Image (cartoon, rainbow, N blue to C red):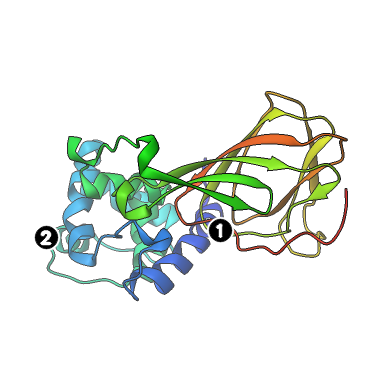
């Protein structure tokens, strides 16, 4: 059972994005257009009905999970656009009450994607960038429309560690080839809070929220090749590594 405290922790980062990005009108990643308040209001009713929730059930969930309680009449005013709310209210009260735990899912639900959003990326539509750790296959974000995921094939040289960094989004990293490859994670830059290290073998993969500090290392004698999937334009802007594995 999700507790109120767990919801507030999970939505803390979401609130930062809402406050700093939505209000400013700057879509994170440069591609995704976050819905305005009016669109969110219209989406709330569809979300509730799609999940078979009554207004009374929304209120009851709000009493358990939201920071501030509210009445069914206020739910009606939200859904009909008769009462505006701040993004802080959205994150702390409305989303928990409606069972919205993943901002990406809610974004997709509010957007209503169509077949026209499917993009076929041909070889001619991408460019190759020689990054710090090998070649990256790049596709212009505007070309991808509302699709938020991009992939890279990275090559990590022997005795190399990537910059220690964090950024928006989520990632999935798959080790294609390489020995003595590892990844480290921590909830703070000094590696004092919940530090953990994973050793990877070929065909192993690891998924993680990019907001957690992370880095990858290759202590082997040959280059390691990795496949990385992550949101468009969410790449960390690290510098060339100064230490060895």
Q: Where residue 40 sits in the image (x, y, percent)?
A: 23, 58
Q: Quadrant of residue 163?
A: bottom right
Which residue is rendered at x = 23% and y = 49% of the image?
A: 111
Tell me the residue that label 2 is attached to: 80
Q: Is residue 120 left or right of residue 83?
A: right
Q: Is residue 209 left or right of residue 155?
A: left
SS at mark 1?
A: helix
Please indicate, yes or no, whether residue 222 appears anywhere in the rendered image. yes
Position of residue 83 relative to residue 196, above or below, is below
Category of crowding for the residue at label 2, using alpha-carbon neighbours closer than 10 angstroms: few (below 14), some (14–19), many (at least 20): some
SS at mark 2?
A: loop
Q: Which mark is residue 9?
A: 1
Of callouts 1 and 2, which one flags the residue occurring earlier in the amino acid sequence? 1
Near-viewer residue (182 or 122): 122
Instruction: Find the residue positioned furthest to the top.
Output: 203
Q: In this view, does 166 lie to the left or right of 104?
A: right
Q: Where residue 138 sits in the image (x, y, percent)?
A: 47, 48
């Amino acid at each position: 059972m999700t507790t109120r405290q767990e919801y507030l922790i999970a939505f803390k980062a979401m609130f930062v994005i809402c406050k700093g990005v939505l209000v400013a009108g700057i879509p994170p990643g440069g591609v995704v257009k976050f819905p305005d308040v009016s669109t969110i209001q219209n989406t709330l009713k569809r979300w509730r009905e799609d999940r078979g929730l009554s207004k009374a059930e929304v209120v009851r969930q709000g009493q358990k999970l939201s920071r501030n309680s509210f009445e069914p009449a206020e739910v009606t005013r939200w859904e009909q656009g008769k009462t505006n709310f701040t993004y802080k209210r959205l994150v702390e009260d409305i989303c928990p009450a409606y069972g919205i735990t993943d901002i990406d899912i809610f974004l997709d639900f509010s957007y209503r994607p169509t077949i026209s959003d499917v993009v076929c990326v041909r070889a001619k539509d991408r460019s190759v960038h020689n990054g710090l750790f090998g070649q990256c296959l790049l596709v212009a974000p505007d070309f991808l429309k509302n699709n938020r995921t991009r992939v890279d094939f990275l090559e990590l040289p022997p005795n190399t560690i990537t910059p220690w960094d964090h950024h928006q989004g989520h990632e999935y990293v798959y080790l294609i080839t390489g020995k003595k490859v590892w990844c480290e994670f921590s909830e703070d830059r000094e590696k004092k809070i919940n530090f953990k290290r994973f050793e990877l073998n070929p065909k192993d993969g690891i998924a993680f929220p990019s907001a957690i500090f992370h880095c990858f290392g290759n202590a082997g004698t040959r280059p390691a090749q990795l496949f990385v999937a992550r949101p468009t334009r969410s790449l960390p802007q690290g510098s060339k590594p100064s230490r060895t594995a």
